[in-house]
Amino acid sequence: MKRIKGLDSVRFICALIVLFGHFGFPFITLLSKTSGNAFLKIIAITISLAFNGPAAVIIFFIISGFCIHYPFRDSKTISLPPYYTRRLLRIGIPALIAFALSYILKIELKPPEFGVFWSIFCEIAYYLIYPVLFYISKIVKWRYMILAAYIISWLLIFTHLDILKNGHNGYPVFGSLNWVIGLPCWLLGCWLSVNYLRFRSISTNRIWIMRLCIISFFIILNIVRFHVHLFIASNCITLNLFALIACAWLGFEIMHYKVKEPPRILEYSGKWSYSLYLTHPATSGFLVYIGFGALMSKYVGLLLIISLIFAYLFYLIIEKPSHRFSIFISSRFSKKPQPSLATVKGVEQ
């Protein structure tokens, strides 16, 4: 199956945004703290607001939905054992090991967020229900399913406004129901995997204008969340609306890289972006654990470098072998006919 170019690059950039959002960016952090020039300080603060981790996770959700449905977009059935073993082992083994590391290093993983793992729980939920959504899509168009998901998420939000207030307008505030809030974003990725050819390739200048607009939305969304004290300013609402814009942008990115080659280093780095997302909290936790917490807070650049090195090693030692193992186990199931969801339900193939 032909690989869609550019998505790995976007994934890695989003992982970096999450990293910078949690740890800060060395020059910008120093400038915002020490500069006596008000104009430079405003610029530094504005740039720091661009590191909007929750918005980057929304883009992760869209790309995830795209990647899950893309291989099945022309299929009539899904063989369940190969699908579940490949997807759940692929995401589950690295997540379990990273979770264990976080627990050992005494990193705070309190509900409802559980640190970065809230989005992993959402992904697992999407993987589990995808076969059902796949067969529903044979009857109901993706756009209607997306609309239904938006309505359900809004009903959950509007009937639990106290949770939004107590959660300070954050995104992962609904605990075990966070996946319901993010489902419209993930379904947009499924829709995009079928409809990306509707977008056209545009010039490099125009694609950069779009990228700057996305960064501007990152900044605006952060300002709205922290300075507009209304429930409609909650990330649960604003980020889900942002997902519509992000989906369209990704469509243009995909078509742009059908005629342009993405940077090789970003494409390769995107392969271990999942490891970077999972392990960067463990990196800071490890440094605190061995007594280098003060060094970490003083030298942010060093922390970032160590995080990247640790993530890459985690990819080589844990994630990459897990990926190969998931493919191996999946292939064992694929060697003989397996029941699909349709046959389980008794529907004639």
Image (spheres, rainbow, N blue to C red):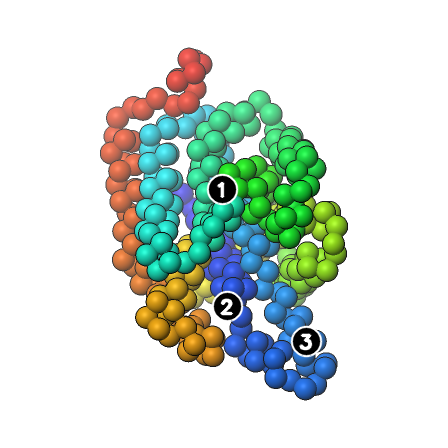
Q: Earlier in the sequence, mark 1 or mark 2?
A: 2
Query: Residue 263 location, x and y as percent?
Result: 47, 65
Q: Earlier in the sequence, mark 3 or mark 2?
A: 2
Residue pictured at 37% horizontal, 70% vertical = 287
Q: Which mark is residue 43?
A: 3
Say above or below: 194 vs 79.
below
Task: Using the numbered discs, state the Cα–Cα distance from disc 3 to disc 2 in whole angstroms.
Answer: 18 Å
Q: Which residue is mark 1?
A: 122
Query: Residue 58 location, x and y as percent?
Result: 57, 50
Q: Is residue 328 left or right of residue 103?
A: left
**Quick one: quadrant of the N terminus?**
top left
Element carrying mark 2: helix
Element carrying mark 3: helix
Q: Earlier in the sequence, mark 1 or mark 3?
A: 3
Q: Quadrant of residue 277?
A: bottom left
Residue pictured at 63% horizontal, 43% vertical = 163
Query: Residue 138 location, x and y as percent?
Result: 54, 24
Query: Residue 136 location, x and y as percent?
Result: 54, 25
Give whichever of 219, 243 is nearer the camera. 219
Say above or below: 182 vs 347.
below
Q: Residue at the bottom extreme? A: 36
Give whichever of 187, 171 is nearer the camera. 171
Q: Which mark is residue 23?
A: 2
Q: Nearer the viewer, mark 3 or mark 2?
A: 2
Residue pictured at 42% horizontal, 13% vertical = 346
Task: Using the numbered discs, state the Cα–Cα distance from disc 1 to disc 3 in whole angstroms.
Answer: 35 Å
For disc 1, the neighbor class at 10 Å (few under 14, some 14 to 19, many from 20) is many
For disc 2, the neighbor class at 10 Å (few under 14, some 14 to 19, many from 20) is some
Q: Are marks 1 and 3 in contact (CB under 8 Å)?
A: no
